Amino acid sequence: MNNALKLEPNDFLVASEYQFTTVEQKALVAFAKRESGRDYYEKPQWNDPKFAADFAATISPTLSRYLSMMASGFGPEILVIRDFPVDDPLPLFSDLSRNVREKSRNSEAILTGIATAMAGSLQREESSHQNGFIQQIYPVNDYKVESSGRGSAPLPFHVENVFIEKAPSFLALACLAGQKGVKTEYLAVTDILKFLSADEICLLSQPKYKIFSGDGFSHRVLLDAPVFDVLANGWVMSRIYEEDRILSDCPIATTAIVALKKAIAQAKLDHVKGIELEAGVILLISNGLAKRRIGGVLHGRKGQIADVNNVSNETSQRWLQRVCIEVPYL
């Protein structure tokens, strides 16, 4: 595969791809092994200049440029990174905690390294059932009916953690084990805007809304928030949930919420794209964030995750890892 960048100016909405070479894979495994003693879940690594420099030296200039462009608001809004070295062997016990504890740290090192290459930091959300810097997207028996990272049910379109003021800038999902028939879908905010009037966009840009947390979080609410929220230096956050998690006490703002839901429904008919994640794929998403415009991407999950009771080398439970990345706005 040719890894040369082929981006037109302002070609934000193309889902670009990058594929690790065999040489890069070996270098990443060696890097992760050298850094295996770190606690990626509880102790930040991006403040360590040596870690950042070593990771930057491990990846290609092409991937570095992709990540830098995205972090500055001038790259693609979706980047599919293929063939990262999944931990080998990948533990396949029935207990998730044991799997995390006994796996090597390839994916943790790579995900953290991506944040450093974007000059960003990983975020933790204290109200989540997993509040470390890296979360497991893996069904938990008691919560399988939830539309959440610990559930098996489909996930409606949303922007990650928009119920907090400093929502993540980017979201990275690394697939350790995939499952046929389950897709990660995405929808560009610009495709939703096509079905909103200027007056409706103006209303949605006013601080008249309450935005609630979703399944898998203790109750949180962001008050007096705009749906299209201007942050700093021209960055704009689109705080969108497809579910009834955006509310308002203002009647006219309520009509804008109705218009937004209709616009999402219309955009979904023509513009939804998706990827059936498989082991070794990282999906890097602009988490509702765009620079000098309203943009970003919503993501969701289509399909019911199967209940795999008898794991084997051929069949395993779907397992993703997620990190929330914040890039500096100032």
Image: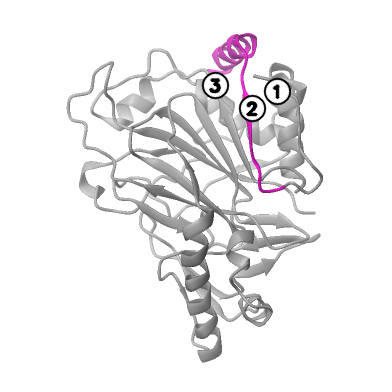
Give the numbered dot on residue 3. Answer: 1
| Residue linked to disc 2 | 18
Give the numbered dot on residue 139. Answer: none
Q: Nearer the viewer, residue 254 or 53?
A: 254
User: Tag 1, which secondary structure?
Assistant: loop
Instruction: Tell me where residue 316 appears, x and y as whole percent.
Output: 28, 25
Image point (66%, 55%), residue name: 289
Placement of 206 over or under 160, stated as above or below: below
Instruction: Tell me where residue 197 appears, x and y as whole percent.
Output: 64, 78
Q: Amino acid at mark 1?
A: Asn
Instruction: Tell me where residue 4 appears, x and y as whole percent.
Output: 75, 25
Q: Quadrant of the rendered structure where residue 252 is?
A: bottom right
Residue 52 magenta: no
- In the rendered structure, are the residues bearing label 1 and label 2 in contact, judged by CB atoms less than 8 Å apart? yes
Q: Could you tell me how far apart the alpha carbons at marks 1 and 2 are, in whole angstroms? A: 6 Å
Q: Amino acid at mark 3?
A: Phe
Stretch in magenta: 12-39
| Residue linked to disc 3 | 84
Q: Could you tell me how far apart the alpha carbons at marks 1 and 3 are, in whole angstroms? A: 15 Å
